[in-house]
Image (spheres, rainbow, N blue to C red):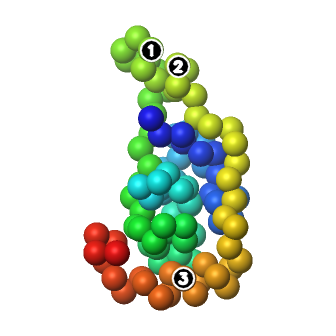
Amino acid sequence: MLELRPNCECCDKDLPPDSMEAYICSYECTFCRSCVDTQLNNVCPNCGGGFCARPVRPKAEHRAGVGLQSHPASTQRVHTQYSAFELSDFSESIKSIKPENR
């Protein structure tokens, strides 16, 4: 089950569970659309993979026990360990390789 992390690991923008601005990699590293497009060039700075839009977990339980109330989003904020220069340098080095070929 996805953690639904509460923030962009790069700029710390709030990304609530219903945010359409949240993007994740296959390890659930979470970034906002702006950082993915402008600073990261669709390259996860942690694993080198690409990003896709994070799904929204339903607020209402349309089936018993399945929804945001039963499975709340994480409240633990996560921040990248890399500097802005390191992020840019890494993404520039592999951005020309399609995510499915990295």
Q: Nearer the viewer, mark 2 or mark 3?
A: 3
| Residue drawn at (28%, 75%) of the image | 101
Residue ID for mark 2: 70
| Residue drawn at (57%, 28%) of the image | 72
**Mark 2 to mark 3 CA distance (whole Å):** 38 Å
**Mark 1 to mark 2 CA distance (whole Å):** 5 Å
Marks 1 and 2: CB-CB under 8 Å? yes
40 up-or-down from 74: above or below: below
Name the amino acid type tagged 1. Answer: Gly
Name the amino acid type tagged 3. Answer: Phe
Name the amino acid type tagged 2. Answer: Ser
> Is residue 60 or residue 29 the one in the foreground?
29
The crowd level at tag 2 (other Cα within 10 Å; few <14, some 14-19, many 20+) is few
Q: Compare marks 2 and 3 and give the one earlier in the sequence.
A: 2
Secondary element type, mark 2: loop
* Residue 102 visible in the snapshot: yes
* Quadrant occupied by the C terminus: bottom left
Q: Compare marks 1 and 2 and give the one earlier in the sequence.
A: 1
The crowd level at tag 3 (other Cα within 10 Å; few <14, some 14-19, many 20+) is some
33 up-or-down from 43: above or below: above
| Residue drawn at (63%, 45%) of the image | 6
